[in-house]
Image (cartoon, rainbow, N blue to C red):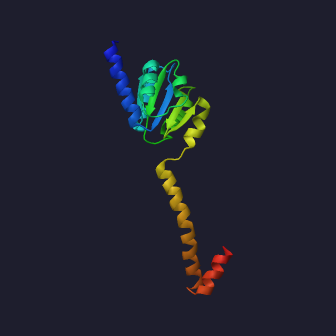
Amino acid sequence: MTREEKSLVIDNLTAQLAENNVIYVTDLTGLNAQETTAIRRACFKANIKLAVVKNTLLAKAMEASDKDFGELPNILKGNSSLMYAEVGNAPAKLIKEFRKKSNKPILKGAYIDSAVFVGDNQLDALAAIKSKNEIIGDIIGLLQSPAKNVISALKSSGGKLAGVLKTLSEK
């Protein structure tokens, strides 16, 4: 690979890092052809982009990026693959699903909205991260609960203020 080709790859990686706020660094070493095809298909279905990268070029792209990747450049040893996604927990859930059948892929680290996670022991924490839509759903559920109490109090009390207050105080 010539210098110009390496420079082009670094520029492309830097652009990918800038465009994505959810980046997982994984190790897919040891997967056979069938398992590799299965993980690529699962990534495609889950809207996760999977790319195998060279560690030295990725480290240079991380240095050139405006983002602070913390300890991630230090974990770039052995084979590395990147997973880009829009939902923060999607790659972690996919990795956990594949782990039911084998011990691969291994999570080296992740960058999610400026937070850096290092090590395979972070997989459960990453899978538990809620997406924006899940958080909005939880908030709506919490906001609906008091409104439902008031409506049920109005219905049970016959609409009289004293009855509404009594019903709400009981709850």
Can residue 123 be seen in the rendering of this structure?
yes
Left/right placement of residue 64 relative to residue 153 reads left
Residue 24 x/y as whole percent: 49, 32
Left/right placement of residue 21 relative to residue 157 reads left
As drawn, 12 above or below 128: above
Pick the residue in front: 156 or 119: 119
Q: Residue at x 53, y 66 (%)?
A: 144
Residue 119 x/y as whole percent: 59, 29
Quadrant assignment for the C terminus: bottom right
Q: Residue at x 46, y 23 (%)?
A: 59
Quadrant assignment for the N terminus: top left
Can residue 34 be seen in the rendering of this structure?
no
As drawn, 7 above or below 154: above
As drawn, 33 above or below 21: above
Residue 55 x/y as whole percent: 46, 20
Pick the residue in front: 146 or 74: 74
As drawn, 94 above or below 36: below
Left/right placement of residue 48 relative to residue 102 reads left
Pick the residue in front: 107 or 56: 56
Residue 140 x/y as whole percent: 50, 61
Q: Residue at x 59, y 30 (%)?
A: 120
Pick the residue in front: 107 or 112: 112
Q: Residue at x 52, y 33 (%)?
A: 110
